[in-house]
Amino acid sequence: MYTIKKFFKILSYIIIYLSTLITGVIITTSAQSKIFKIEDIEIYEPFNANFNKEIVINKAFSIAFKELTSSIITTKDQKKITYTKLNEIKYLVDSFEIKNERFLNKEYIAKFNVNFNKKRTLNYFEKKNIFPSLKINKDFLTILILYDNDKNQIFLYDKNPFYKNWNKDKKKFFLINYILIEEDIEDLEIISNNKENIENYQFDKIIKKYGLNDYIISIMFKNKKELRVLSKFFFDENLKIINHKYNNIDLNDKNAINNLILKTKTNLEDLWKSNNLINTSLKLPINLQINPKDTLNVINLENEMDKIDLIYDYYVTSISNKNLYYKVIFNGSPKQFLKIMNEKNILIDIKNEIWKVK
């Protein structure tokens, strides 16, 4: 299928070229629409006289939409689309696949892969005044500290209920992968010896041991009445700090601990998403030129552009014997575009108004 796709793309270019030669009219072709893919949505439904396959499929669409929005939209903006109608969701669906479909003990069981049309979805978000985030998964070294103000005591590792339960429930839509520090006596001594100034302490000595530049430090300050969570979020040489207070938290209540972990993770996810927002209102037109005879270069260019979330759309505008021309609509600045292309080893000559792919 992958080869056939490329074959038809190249065939379309030939048709464009021949049409241009014969009629002198430029025909445009749009690139295959990109998608947001949500995989392995599990559906369980009673199999009885009232069973309706369409209802099951619609249920999968709704769950997939919820998972998509949870992964790329901040909690604040998710409230704007809480009551999205089913017909609106179905309009955004590009295709879907049913896997492992079976009937067991009077129950219908299946997994769904749902593909959302990216352009339609981004347009829908824009109408709701929502800027989605790039879906970037990221490893963060994570240090979790429980500080009991009343006892003036530090709790780490297995004596810290937050550390013990932090990674037990991993949500599919979370983008941050938390790399918890390992139990280490030396680290325990370092942290304990600096407990009086723990809020302002620099953890460089511990962080350097793990070889990760980006980190999260969450310190839970507990007293009889409240629990304050201070999180330091360090990414790309920038430090952001968030503070949240919670009343009447029982550290012996597992549900309370898990709920607080979820709230803290959600706050951190929102911070990460805000760092990677797509400004869909900014649609920068870029004209690209490439040699159509270099088939492998053409295919590589399109493959890479398909993977770039900041590219809203691209399409062929014309073709000649020497040049193939694209119009690219980019949600960002020229500098961002060139940086991304350079990272993908696609070199571009920007001397002229139409940029040339080398």
Image: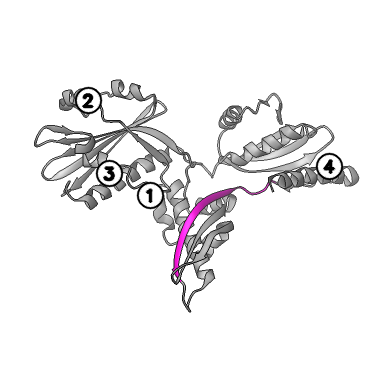
Residue that badge 2 annotates: 185
The label nearer to you, 1 versus 3, is 3
For marks 4 and 2 on the same chain, the one whose residue lies earlier in the sequence: 4
Query: Contact (CB < 8 A) between labels 2 and 3?
Result: no
Q: Quadrant of residue 328?
A: top right
Provide the secondary structure element on which disc 2 rests: helix
Q: Residues within 10 Å of mark 1 (few under 14, many from 20)?
A: some
Q: Residue at x 76, y 35 (%)?
A: 295
Residue that badge 4 annotates: 17
- Residue closest to the eye, 22 or 190: 190
Number of numbered discs: 4
Amino acid at circle 3: Asn
Provide the secondary structure element on which disc 1 rests: helix
Q: Main secondary structure of the magenta part?
A: strand
Q: Could you tell me how far apart the alpha carbons at marks 4 and 1 are, in whole angstroms?
A: 48 Å
- Residue closest to the eye, 145 or 71: 145
Q: Quadrant of residue 215?
A: top left
Q: Could you tell me how far apart the alpha carbons at marks 3 and 4 are, in whole angstroms?
A: 61 Å
Q: Residues within 10 Å of mark 4 (few under 14, many from 20)?
A: many
Amino acid at circle 1: Thr
* Span of residues in magenta: 31-46
Query: Contact (CB < 8 A) between labels 1 and 3?
Result: no
Q: Could you tell me how far apart the alpha carbons at marks 2 and 1 are, in whole angstroms?
A: 38 Å
Residue that badge 1 annotates: 75
Percent x, y of residue 137? 45, 39
Q: Residue furthest front?
A: 105
Q: Quadrant of residue 245?
A: top left
Residue that badge 3 annotates: 165
- In the image, residue 328 lies in the stretch drawn in magenta: no
